Image (spheres, coloured by chain):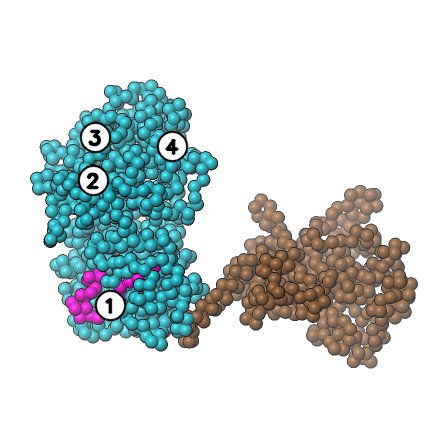
Chain colours: A brown, B cyan
Amino acid sequence: FYLTPSQVNSILKANEYSFKVPEFDGKNVSSVLGFDSNQLPANAPIEDRRSAATCLQTRGMLLGVFDGHAGCACAQAVSERLFYYIAVSLLPHETLLEIENAVESGRALLPILQWHKHPNDYFSKEASKLYFNSLRTYWQELIDLNSGETTDVREALINAFKRLDNDISLEAQVGDPNSFLNYLVLRVAFSGATACVAHVDGVDLHIANTGDSRAMLGVQEEDGSWSAVNLSYDHNAQNEHEVERVKMEHPKSEEKSLVKQDRLLGLLMPFRAFGDVKFKWSIELQKRVVESGPDQLNDNEYTKFIPPNYHTPPYLTAEPEVIHHKLRPQDKFLVLATDGLWETMHRQDVARIVGEYLTGVHHQQPIAVGGYKVTLGQMHGLLTERRARISSVFEDQNAATHLIRHAVGNNEFGTVDHERLSKMLSLPEELARMYRDDITIIVVQFNSHVIGAY
Amino acid sequence: AVRMFLRLLSDIQWRAAHPKWRRMTGSQRSTSTTAEPHPVSLPAQAQVVICGGGIMGTSVAYHLSKMGLKDIVLLEQGRLAAGTTRFCAGIVSTARPVSIELKMAHYSNKLYQQLEQETGVQTGYMKTGSISLAQTQDRLISLKRIASSLNVMGIPCEIISPKKVLQLHPLINIHDLVGAMYVPEDALVSSANVSLALATAASQNGVQIHERTCVSHVTIQKGRVTGVETDRGRIQCEFFVNCAGQWAYELGHSGEEPVHIPLHACEHFYLLTHPLKEPLSSSLPTIVDPDGRIYIRNWQGGILSGGFEKNPKPLFTEGRNQLEIQNLQEDWDHFGPLLDALLRRMPGLEALQIMQLVNCPESFTPDMRCIMGESPTARGYFVLAGMNSAGISYGGGAGKFLAEWIVNGYPSENVWPLDLKRFGTLQSSRTFLRHRVMEVMPLMCDLKVPRWDFQTGRQLRTSPLYDRLDAQGARWMEKHGFERVKYFVPPGNDLLDLDHSKTFYKPDWFDIVGSEVKCCKEAVCVIDMSSFTKFEISSTGDQALESLQYLFSNDLDVPVGHVVHTGMLNEKGGYENDCSIARLSKRSFFMISPTDQQVHCWAWLKNRLPDDSNLVMEDVTWKYTALNLIGPRAVDVLSELSYAPMTVEHFPSLFCKEMSVGYANGIRVMSITHTGEPGFVLYIPIEYALHVYNEVMNMGQKYGIRNAGYYALRSLRIEKFFAFWGQDLDAFTTPMECGREFQVKLDKGMQFLGQEALWEQKQNGVYKRFTMFILEDHDTDMDLWPWWGEPIFRNGRYVGKTTSSAYSYTLERHVCLGFVHHFDEKTGEELVVTTDFINQGEYEIDIAGQRFQAKAKLYPFSSLFTQRRRKDEVELSGYQRE
């Protein structure tokens, strides 16, 4: 059976979200025009998460995609918490003091973040108190540390990533008297998540990446065509530098067992991640926590299982690689996406599809007959297909949705094939994961006028 | 590929066969692009210099030399026939909706047919015939209308069934057709070769042709052309002809005194294919599928097919000049919809191999009609350009008319619809042209329904009351850039949207206009008529009166405060303009004429008034807002507002007085209404317009006043048998032929223009007579409505065409106005038309092939109308303009 085009659309558009940076006095003074995001599940429930927020006490906007594994708990926690850690890391000393004083005296807190969330993007109510306390401890330490130096974005990002991972680990070790919370913090720590986060402030774009999600810049060349610039490196077995790093961090005796079948210790695809304490804690710590933990944890074979050749933990880190890029007028958009997208599409195609979608101009190579033998019928077929491609642009109001449509529905000619799209979307839950991964995409559109004026 | 294609389209052998021409120009046909030496230098002077060596320039040169002019130079910046002419599809089609265009195409066809014999140059002329397809009933109606007018011109033409189409052209898919029109004598030519043949003949008749000579500008002194500056020196000349095609606009603007030629180029695409397996016969008829927006002709055993897409691509807006049109980019994606239409029409062509997609820019004009004639500002500066992609069809005829114009001072037919002077500077904005041609080009294939209004380039000139009227439901049309009200849609009364209101039948505004007409008859209506052209002519002494007495046929030496309706006639007694003139004082006159006369009338008078600094003419069109108060209660409204008695005893008909209305003083009130109904026109200085309008509407309330539009006015004037200039009257119509002898004072004691011709007509009778027809068996609800241009039959024989028509809400019948001729039954010679001839015939009007009985009348009804008028009020029959 086939899904009708409108059924296909309702599936594709179920999670789409768009945000436009509000204008002041008819002008958008931000370097970001807005963003489109969307996700298409393959797992049930989906293990990807996404976040977007504007920093209220400092300038800048934060956007991130998080790809969870071994469950969605870690990705969910990171998507809720990471931006607070980053925002706090960026705050000047006085603001931190002000916030701490407000909490101390029970006054209303200055809001730190303004979230831009799809209704399906939820926050855990139960854990908020716990999470808040950890965050408060972090800023109290920052206040005590008061370096007096201005906050460097790169440092802040790295510190925030590491600190959050540390807190996740600590919370799991300490446990919580509330059994629900206790189980939650353990699930967060024993599952894992990659993170790819962008911080945009004026022309300064920072990408902090941990794992194998990817950030890509869409650049419009002078001739109007589109090209892609990578702003992150995948942390996986395909990245020689990563393999090198992991090997450097462990004794030579482990060299052979460190990376097997392109996986860390033969198990884990990403070489950096949040959570995943099974790759971080010592065997003793793992055993102690699991044994003292709730029964559900003990019943789980996965948590009890110790990776083979586990000699010198930690094998895994959440420390991100940070890339700084000064935005130029030709940098039109940024795509953050989990590996579900990059497995199916080449970045060059992503740049072209999004670029053409955003500019509304379908920059197709003009057809020239030249010396070729082309019949009227062949030309007719070719033109019809090109027009169909354009009409699929107008179907979507969201660049991320448009990209997903291509990622799932593209045929060998690079055009969306409805039949294929329908098949891929109507796969039964248990089969879906075999044909595709969760896909999460954020497309940030830049304001070339503002960028050009810097 | 371009080179090969050029060779294919045009036979380059022709020049070798004509060494004489070759010697004269001294330039070899060569593919090299470097400039070649010009062994023959330019003459220092010539009588006529023609710029442009395309079909238009060569046709003008051909006809001028045929008419005996010897001293002619034709300049071409590149090579002959290398522009649009070379690339155009070469279809000669007579199926044109506008009668003058049809005549030009008919003449062109006859000319091209014998051109090869005359010149020895192969023109590729092939009489293939053409078939215009109809996918809808409405389209078939429009084809039937064209068929009617072709038939009465003696051009064979028939409406055929889809089955017959298949017999004539076996490749056509006919399943979606409702019918078609077959014109068997339409032809194909190689357009470049036709142009070269005309050049050859012209050259043999003494025309000097210089290629690779670029006109930089035209010099004008004291409003006359004096010469041409080129990159090879100056030529003094008496006449200059701008045939520069899509560069005509730029050329017009290159001199110190600009000549505005409103046209703009659009890309035009057509497809060439390799031959079919079984090559198509070269005699296969050309197919025009307007609903699919395409044409298809046979070409070298394959096909040539192009069309007029919905989303045209205008180009050269910034005015770039190019020597020859280089091969512009092929744009297959743009051509896609036309290719769809082609394969739908001829599915068997799928396997046919493509040779090339040709991009050939064409120039288009703001009203889809070509541009010819003399510049209003520079005497001797003539233009022929803007062919709206029908250059080959018009080429011969247009060249002939323009040559006559130069030699005789006027062409042999009424070409006002094509006259350059229908435009002014206001149509010359590049933005306006760019937007308008994007609407015009798709219109080539759109259904031409009555009362079409352009949607682009609007709201340029407006009355100060525009917003007020718009807020009250006004629906607008445009004339000469001025917005005018058609009718007012009452609140809560929704009309059909634009697309659905296109009809050949009863329109959706029928009842709305009916109630406006009723109000004009029974109470009072106000119509904003500010668009009229208004001049003031005054002098220190008697110069104004003396000059006007010579230029106008009626007697203008009337007491101050009187209004005179009069024609502005040419030497042949024909109407150049029809106007109302008020004598404001002994020495000054106020002249009102139709909206589109602004340029023509100004030029006509300027060229004929004595060059005397004591005689001043001023265009005051923009200074006054005109409100027309029509109806029996207009008297009451105006007298209450002015505290002055306005009854006939105090303010007789055809009277003009400055008075106060409300608080505003200095309002020029005239007792004319342009409809034959009682009432007044108020000429209000614009700053008082809103005040006076408000006062009139407030005071009018108790008399049942309402707004009305031009459609109501039109119905009123046509049922009163009032002719109006530009529609019924033209330069080939005299007052004697339209029952206006009373507006001619042959014995006014001094000579006037056209007097002799009128004397002769008075003595010998007229050859056509303006007649009113009341349709007898026409069902207003069910039958097609007449429009204009419908053939008139007397006792079964064709005698003329209608010029306008309207539904008369008083007679509850359709009224058509038109001219009746008397053609000798045997020889076809035109005979004198007498009153008896008119009265003794049985008449029929042909609407799209269906004939309706009509009653002919030479005088308007009088008893039918409730309001009795005094005898002198017959003079109210002014002119009417739409």
**Disc 1 on helix, strand or loop?**
strand
Residue type (three-letter) at the residue carrying disc 1:
Met
The span shown in magenta is: B108-133
Residue A389 among those drawn in magenta: no
- Residue identifier under label 2: B856
- Residue identifier under label 1: B126
Quadrant position of the N terminus of chain A in the picture: bottom right
Q: Quadrant of residue B42?
A: bottom left
Dot 1 and dot 4 residues touching (CB under 8 Å): no
Residue type (three-letter) at the residue carrying disc 2:
Ala
Query: Is residue B661 rendered to the left or right of residue B120?
Result: right
- Residue identifier under label 4: B707
Task: Give me the chain letter of mark 4.
Answer: B
Task: Give me the chain letter of mark 3.
Answer: B
Image spot of residue B560 (x, y percent): 21, 26
Quadrant position of the C terminus of chain A in the picture: bottom right
**Disc 3 on helix, strand or loop?**
helix
